[in-house]
Amino acid sequence: MPTNEKERNPFKIAQMQLKAACDALGEDESVYLLLSEPERVLKVSIPVKMDDGSSKMFTGYRVQHNDAPGPCKGGVRFHPNVTEDEVKALATWMTFKCGVMNLPYGGAKGGVVVDPNELSQGELERLARGYAKAITPIIGERRDIPAPDVNTNGQIMVWMTDEYSKLRGVGQTLMATFTGKPVEFGGCHARREATGYGVALMAKEAVKYKGLEMKGQRSVVQGFGNVGSYAALYLEELGSKVIAVSDVNCCLYHPDGLDIKALMKHTEQNKTIKGFAGAAKEMDREDVFKVECDIFAPCALENAITVDNADDIKAKIICEGANGPTTPAAEKVLLDKGIFIVPDILANAGGVTVSYFEWVQNLHSFYWTFDEVQQKQEAKMIDSFNQIVEIMEKGYDMRTAAYMFSIKRIATPMRLRGWF
Ligand SMILES: NC(=O)C1=CN([C@@H]2O[C@H](COP(=O)(O)OP(=O)(O)OC[C@H]3O[C@@H](n4cnc5c(N)ncnc54)[C@H](OP(=O)(O)O)[C@@H]3O)[C@@H](O)[C@H]2O)C=CC1
Ligand SMILES: O=C(O)CCC(=O)C(=O)O
């Protein structure tokens, strides 16, 4: 099947996924109409003073997709390939992700077109503060709560909180406006681990659903950033062998399983998995799709699995840590091969779920332990998994089932508010 541009535009893909679920539900046409476009798209220009004395202008976005269930929620991405359509797609997926987890939020997402590797620490801080300032008019603990995503982290959330508090706090620190902060600064235990932990948990539930056990399963993880590294760590902890992982530079393979803790240490020091002494083979990064395995977890970016490589994947289960890693045409190939796909809006929902816990704790200034957080995350994710599987068993693929489950939670407040 040929690939085409439409299939790879993430926003068009998000609209297609929504349409399929609305049709399956027989929903009022207004529901699709209201959910197929974001409520608000803010485009900003951010001036940054560079270390050499020159000035540069960066483009950023904050997209608020829907706020019917509650304030908007979603991360901020710093990446050179950020586009308006990408941020619109990511914001749309956030609405349905929050619905899947029954969180009192709608969806949002932000992005800045930048390669942060090209900035000094000072330039990065000024960019983060400039972005926070630019989106200040539309965010807030009861309006829209940003968080980390690709190439952003706890430190960046602290700078943004500090900047926002200066502009809006009048002498107070407004802790609940950004989540994903370090534990030492209003953050929540287990948030850093949360998305990857959730990916591993969902893989384990899928394994169980297939009547198998985690022990002995062979996992492969594409991407070794926040999500991929913790997904690999917990896949290992839950009993599987992680036989391959990749990043932008290469793919590492070991048939007996890689030592993920050691690999995380290596990556912290070297900023890449390349050169890790504990691998049996270092291969091209695209080889990650060809490694025979039981669980494949794409944890990098959108459109990783396309019709060009879908046939190479020989896994029983795909658990989507990244947002939008599978194109619709590739998904058809995978489903035809009988692969069980845990969709992104469920598989990677651990991050926003623990962000919600952080927000709740910030609003009450009362903090939970690491174990308390993980137990609450696990209970919520397993509950959603089971409810979505029930819908799937009525004859739908799991992604459509997850959307069907979620749409009801968003359509009801829209209906009650009289939006249609
Ligand atoms: N952070 C979070 O809490 C959440 C993130 N997500 C999604 O998970 C995905 C990853 O996010 P996150 O881990 O935070 O981002 P990070 O920036 O921490 O990590 C991204 C990783 O992907 C790697 N990568 C990029 N392109 C490729 C490629 N072509 N092949 C292999 N590896 C690649 C990067 O490699 P390198 O470092 O070498 O550049 C890096 O290891 C994104 O889709 C994000 O939207 C979803 C839910 C929550
Ligand atoms: O933690 C959050 O609020 C959002 C995380 C996120 O951006 C995502 O789930 O894609």
Image: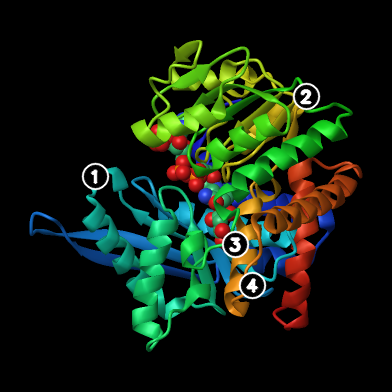
- Disc 3 vs disc 1: which is toward the camera? 3
Query: Dividing the image into 4 quarters, which one contains the C terminus?
Result: bottom right
- Disc ID at residue 360: 4
- Residue 254, compared with residue 63, is above or below; it is above
SS state under label 4: helix
The earlier-in-sequence mark between 3 and 2 is: 2
Residue 362, image x and y in percent?
Answer: 57, 74
How far is the residue under mark 4 from the one under mark 2? Answer: 36 Å
Residue 109, image x and y in percent?
Answer: 50, 61
Camera-side residue of 366 and 115:
366
CB of mark 3 near ligand 2 (< 8 Å):
yes
Q: Residues within 10 Å of mark 4 (few under 14, many from 20)?
A: some
SS state under label 2: loop
Q: What is the image's colouring? A: rainbow
How far is the residue under mark 3 from the one under mark 1? Answer: 29 Å
- Disc ID at residue 215: 2
Camera-side residue of 257 and 398:
257
The earlier-in-sequence mark between 3 and 4 is: 3
- Residue 342, compared with residue 332, is above or below; it is below
User: What amino acid type should be assigned to the residue bearing mark 3?
Assistant: Ser
User: What amino acid type should be assigned to the residue bearing mark 4?
Assistant: Val
Q: Are marks 1 and 2 in contact (CB under 8 Å)?
A: no
Residue named by callout 1: 118
Q: Are marks 3 and 2 in contact (CB under 8 Å)?
A: no
Give me the residue at 33% from left, 62% from top. Answer: 128
- Disc 1 vs disc 2: which is toward the camera? 2
Camera-side residue of 222 and 327:
222
- Disc ID at residue 355: 3
How far is the residue under mark 1 from the one under mark 2? Answer: 42 Å
- Residue 18, compared with residue 45, is above or below; it is above
Q: Is 185 placed left or right of 350 in the picture?
A: left
